[in-house]
Image (tube, coloured by chain):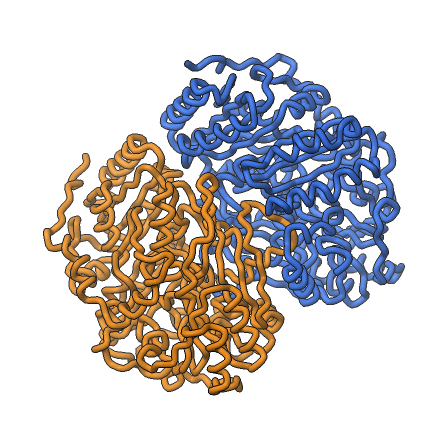
Chain colours: A orange, B blue
Amino acid sequence: MMPCLVPKWPAWLFCWRAACIQGASVRQRMWAELSRIPGLVGPRGAWGTSPLIRRGSSSASSRAPEVTLTPERYPVRRLPFSVVSEDDLATLEQIVPGRVITDPEELEAPNVDWLRTVRGSSKVLLRPRTTQEVAHILRYCHERNLAVNPQGGNTGMVGGSTPVFDEIILSTALMNQVLSFHDVSGVLVCQAGCILEALSQYVEERGFVMPLDLGAKGSCHIGGNVATNAGGLRFLRYGSLRGTVLGLEVVLADGTVLNCLTSLRKDNTGYDLKQLFIGSEGTLGVITAVSILCPPKPSAVNVAFLGCPGFAEVLQTFRTCRAMLGEILSAFEFMDAECMKLVRFHLGLSCPVQESPFYVLVETAGSGPQHDAEKLGHFLEQVLDSGLVTDGTLGSNERRIRMLWALRERITEALSHDGYVYKYDLSLPLDRLYDLVDDLRVRLGPSAKRVVGYGHLGDGNLHLNVTAETFCASLLGALEPYVYEWTAGQWGSVSAEHGLGFKKKDVLGYSKPPEALQLMRQVKALLDPKGILNPYKTLPTHA
Amino acid sequence: MMPCLVPKWPAWLFCWRAACIQGASVRQRMWAELSRIPGLVGPRGAWGTSPLIRRGSSSASSRAPEVTLTPERYPVRRLPFSVVSEDDLATLEQIVPGRVITDPEELEAPNVDWLRTVRGSSKVLLRPRTTQEVAHILRYCHERNLAVNPQGGNTGMVGGSTPVFDEIILSTALMNQVLSFHDVSGVLVCQAGCILEALSQYVEERGFVMPLDLGAKGSCHIGGNVATNAGGLRFLRYGSLRGTVLGLEVVLADGTVLNCLTSLRKDNTGYDLKQLFIGSEGTLGVITAVSILCPPKPSAVNVAFLGCPGFAEVLQTFRTCRAMLGEILSAFEFMDAECMKLVRFHLGLSCPVQESPFYVLVETAGSGPQHDAEKLGHFLEQVLDSGLVTDGTLGSNERRIRMLWALRERITEALSHDGYVYKYDLSLPLDRLYDLVDDLRVRLGPSAKRVVGYGHLGDGNLHLNVTAETFCASLLGALEPYVYEWTAGQWGSVSAEHGLGFKKKDVLGYSKPPEALQLMRQVKALLDPKGILNPYKTLPTHA
């Protein structure tokens, strides 16, 4: 029995791309201009999952209300760094001539995160083009004790990419050159400011895919992805950046260039220093170039979008899926009914299957179209017959696949339309993954507008989001530390893939023991003794 | 056309297992006894590739000639550590009662590496069972300034696991308990002294496989594998340990226990400290427990053993293979005709295909037996028809697969019978991978007995080995620094997967810039300020 595998797309859904483009904000336009230099521009991935929008397009509109300055909302004190002087500006102008930005209007967007939850007051943004320029900048800032906020696409979720006070913003936007690509090994070497989607397009034209993919692909920079240790949608298949990043070039706090930009799959010569910088959110060094292993592009991609009657059935569908699809399984995502309501209400997307308490998106990617379709067919038959899945629809051409993915990928965007969003990105044991969502609905009652759960089920990664009309301290009090304590009680992680940045730095202790915190502080002191790199981020304020 | 895919195994080949077991040495028996406690013993993997022997069984025989003391062969001076006193022994006896070994006969084997190239003069070996015992030992040694040599299965290739002088040997042999296994996620948590093959058997019985496999599996410990960042035979499929190791418990030089033993696929809370210890060869901390992600056991495994007329054809076979087998390709190994002569001459194995200049072993592992066989069949047809491959044989049952793998896996063992072996483990660009072997044959002429090349072609990893009747300084002079300079000229790595240990530590500079060496020294000083952990290893003697 294979019911309801016919697509059910309303015609208007085909128009959403145009709507997004028309709705592009001032901020988005500014960044688009920044990319308009010779180099890698015009991102749009070909394999499967492009949302075709850029973060910030909806929420960072020039008509949106002012974002509160970070030090006014959060208890944080400026550290005794120097203040940028006229002499400093003159020197910086010599280092990056014509690329020292001090116009307050141009500085508005890079001072605010795309979620519009934090806002710095930086007066200077620098746009280096080369590693040597970055080295020169950092050497000078180190000598002068000037704090620096490295910034890629500014698409982070935890306030890690915007200044907190007046840190100099060091943008990688003009560092967007591909340095080399090897079409047998699939090793890509590029500057840190290349936009992920542009890289996807570049390697797909050559028969490969990027080993990572995420909703912010249209704006995020590969250097920022690596600095965040971004997870995303292909993690299940291609694993962590810790395995796929082969080399890095990094500029240290004092301007020293650390060239570990090898293209070797295996290299056991000494300590693997690049690992220090993966996931350190720009607090230990500024990543200037990345060498990354791209897997061959699969010749067949299929997506199934399924409705499940309960979370137990979602889990059982995952087990069945892994057993029956094996090596061709490339993503297993889930979303609850509330998420579906959100994308319908705010973005006008419609549910392609019968309404269900839970939805699952399964993607396969393989080298044998017929074999893959056969495996997927058997799997669907099995889960439909056994009642694990009540309804489903399939996509195998690019447009259909994009549409099905949009339902999952655009939840974040839909949430940002729903009011103030309290975001949690947790790793939890699979069996308990959704219990916290149910629990919070009871705990918060009507004080929350919505409590939703979705995420990368195959990786044990729950995105838990709570919305309210506006920021509300009492709701925050009901959420925190409760959510963190609940997670710690399950030996989970309070930040699965988003990092800690500014907003989550003080909860590190819920997932790491004091001995680890102590060693992290020592590592920070070793690499950045003056603490000028992305201050107020990653490590907790108090010991 | 599908010629010659019929097996050609001589009957005597079936007997080799018995021969190996009969030939087991005193040393091997001793270590076997060490494992005979409640816990994980009796290693023998089920999936495909077990060589069914333990390293040391042939070369570390009690009848073998004495190994020269390391300080007599290499220019190395003892650092001013304390010497173990009677008081120290009494204290250590309190920490690990009955497990302080001082009997010179028992200390003979752990003082010598399995290749019999280096030999320390340690007077004490400790066998802790728990992390707390390790912590207690290190705290004491740190206070007393006693040097410590952590030791797993002592199967390393670069003298990293044996003492250089009189360091206390800290053996993980009794730390061999599985702590937990999750049969949905496949996450295994175990003590560091578990033998890899025993773990393989354990997880295979539960429907999973270890993400790494290597020739020394019958002896090596998982803690040592992680400390070395071992590569091996499944690297091509499952990637680096940096991606598959989810958590570590480590005891630092001063006895602090660093518990980062999480079982989460994603955890971006602060710096990923465990990465510091992966591949640091016991010089930054002692790994006491490991959490590792095991992939589901493939339901179909096939091996093809092929003969190729030249190295260009080997490379082209690899390209074809990757394109046609895609996600089911799990290994692509190569060996030259000299390697085949070695395994035939010293181990009595016979070539299962027509004699050729090169041989290739292709393994597939997938979830659809029929699909996989079909893909493999098409691939073989293609490479045979196009002349890339001149002859081939297939294995799909466990015994046949083991036999085919033995030809590749037992080369190291065969080499150890051939005389003194100069071993190089290099990462090189695929196109130039074999040029160095040809080049050396010309350069060395008759001064070398044999120059052979084999390795993990799919990972760009060449094992280059040169044999001579005995150690010869002039041959070494012809090899070094020539091999390292040649490799550095190709931006290769002078240690792809074996690490640097004692024997390769001074060549680190060929693959890493001075800035990296400087930072490595700083990291070492931060984590082990007295330098008591595995001294004389990994970092070069001189700045």
Residue in the foreground of this view, choosing between A323 and A39: A39
Quadrant where the N terminus of chain B lies?
top left
Q: Nearer the viewer, residue A306 or A35?
A: A35
At x 30% / y 56%, what residue is drawn?
A42
Q: Is residue A247 in sight in this rendering?
A: yes
Residue B250 vertical placement versus B390 (above, below): below
The residue under the point 54% across, 25% down is B401
Residue at coordinates 57% horizontally, 58% vertically from top-left?
A259
Task: Single out the residue that lies furthest toward the left.
Answer: A11
Task: Choose top left, top right, bottom left or bottom right for residue A406.
Answer: bottom left
Instruction: Give coordinates of residue A39: x percent, y percent.
Output: 38, 57
Whether residue A481 can be seen here: no
- Side of A515 relative to A241 (left or right): right
Whole-percent x, y for residue A118 in the image: 36, 77
Vertical placement of B94 versus A47: above or below?
below
Give residue A534's position: percent from left, percent from top. 48, 74
Q: Position of residue A331 (x, y in %)?
A: 34, 47
The quarter of the picture where the C terminus of chain B appears is: bottom right
Q: How many marks?
A: 0
From this view, report whether residue A446 is shown above or below residue A337.
below
User: Within the image, what quadrant is residue A479 found in?
Assistant: bottom left
Q: Quadrant of residue B65?
A: top right
Q: Nearer the viewer, residue B242 or A153?
A: A153
Q: Nearer the viewer, residue B133 or A463?
A: A463
